[in-house]
Amino acid sequence: MHDIILAGNSLTEFSHIKSILDSLFKIKDLSQLKYFLGIEVAHSKLGISLCQRKYCLDLLDDTSTLGSKPLSTPSDSSLKLHLDSSPPFEDVPAYRRLIGRLLYLNNTRPDITFITQQLSQFLSKPTQAHHSAAFRVLKYLKGCPGKGLFFPRSSSITLQGFSYADWAGCIDTRRSISGQCFFLGNSLISWRNKKQITVSRSSYEVEYRALASATCELQWLLYLLKDLHITCSKLPVLYCDNQSAIHIAANPVFHERTKHLEIDCHLISEKLQSGILKLLPVSSQDQVADFFHQSLAP
Amino acid sequence: MSLHTQPEPKTYAEASKHDCWKQAMQAEIQALEKTGTWKLVDLRPDVKPIGCRWIYKVKFHVDGTVGRYKARLVAKGYNQIEGLDYFDTYYPIAKLTTVRLVIALSSINNWYIHQLDVNNTFLHGDLQEDVYMMIPPGIKSIKTNQVCKLTKSLYGLKQASRKWYKS
């Protein structure tokens, strides 16, 4: 809102823009980008790294967890969060505030995306179990407050996306959770983990739905690159580990079995035919988006 | 390294005991007067002015040292009435994905990345609506029973962010 980032290859152009802006508003030139919206930016020969170390430490300080014993994973992989019958957590606003701050940490921390999505399902009625799961995240953060993203300099300009779905992943509603992530070259720039809004009876349907929402995000990123006059060196690729979903997307004829899929899901085959992206299978081992569906194993 | 031991003051009375906060308020008042944020007018009996208050914040550097003392005057926008005091409040902001994409691109292309900060962002928008505000503590008025008629947008107003976008 108050901050402006300039990126480009010409410093003369920079000073030109700065003088125009300065004549309209009073601006302060902070020179090289270092600290922006609570995100610390470090530049090196190899690349640029982003982290929210200070934000993270402030969060630990405010929740009095700075002195706690660090844990190596953000969540307990044997525990599946649900609407359990443990006693309700009394201070609901405090729980919501905590999740809100974890959500903001998600800007540079894909490692807590899975658990943040899990915890945010219970904002209206958190229980003691949810609260202690949230505190476990803090203990994990304590061990690595400065972890963040790294954007290497040696990288091509290509877009790669991964799509994944956890069929009936929510045990309270049996709705599925879709996940997606996108890389510009070797840099992770966008990721998301979201519960689908409908219940699906078949696993290919949820994969197909996840694929459709990944396609929307990919299309958005392509528009953004186009606006910035950046051309990708290769056709964008979307990886999906479900063969049936790929077949439905590739097959322009909808048959009996796919009749129930809503029309908006079929936007993926439309985009495929217009040739803006390529859809490729990926083995489950190489599935990156999977990362957003599992508790991290130590 | 300057050590900051006192908590941030909550009220004007508390803050006005300390020089650092008095200076900070003075700087804010000067900025407000320079942009002509309001005119002092007599209070009409049919007008109900909105309140205002000072917010005090110590800004720290990344290393934990005190950066500066910041005092900001905000209007109590929650008393505003839609259709009378304000109309539209929509304001676009950049998605963090966009920021990450631009930084990743800069890394690949070895671009320079610079940062600019707009001082007193919200004070740049003109206000068409008639909004009256009580005179903030710290500003002396010659006559009694006067209020501020806002001519520029102020932090806290419902339409503040939109006015900056439009300006």
Image (spheres, rainbow, N blue to C red):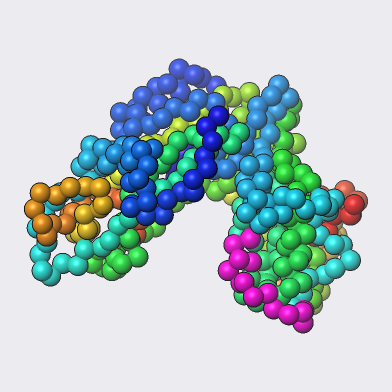
Query: Would residue B167 be found to the left or right of residue A211 on screen?
Result: left
Picture mark count: 0
Which of A8 and A244 lies nearest the eye of the viewer?
A: A8
In the rendered view, would you say A256 is above or below A54? below
Q: Residue at x 73, y 25 (%)?
A: A46
Residue A97 among magenta residues = yes
Question: Can I make out residue A288 in this image?
Answer: yes
Residue A23: percent from left, percent from top: 30, 28
Residue A92 among magenta residues = yes
In the rendered view, would you say A57 is above or below A135? above
Q: Residue at x 52, y 39 (%)?
A: B4
Which of A106 and A229 lies nearest the eye of the viewer?
A: A106
Q: Which residue sits furthest bottom? A: A85
Residue B104: percent from left, percent from top: 65, 34
Q: Residue at x 33, y 61 (%)?
A: B77
Question: Can I make out residue A275 in this image?
Answer: no
Residue stretch rendered in magenta on the structure: A84-98
Q: Which residue sits furthest top? A: A12
In the rendered view, would you say A27 is above or below B48? above
Name the quadrant containing residue A171: bottom right
Query: Would residue A241 be found to the left or right of residue A48 on screen?
Result: right
Residue B14: percent from left, percent from top: 37, 51
Quadrant in the picture for the N terminus of chain B: top right
Quadrant in the picture for the C terminus of chain B: top left
Which of A237 and A99 lies nearest the eye of the viewer?
A: A99
Residue A102: percent from left, percent from top: 66, 56
Which of B41 and A15 lies nearest the eye of the viewer?
A: B41
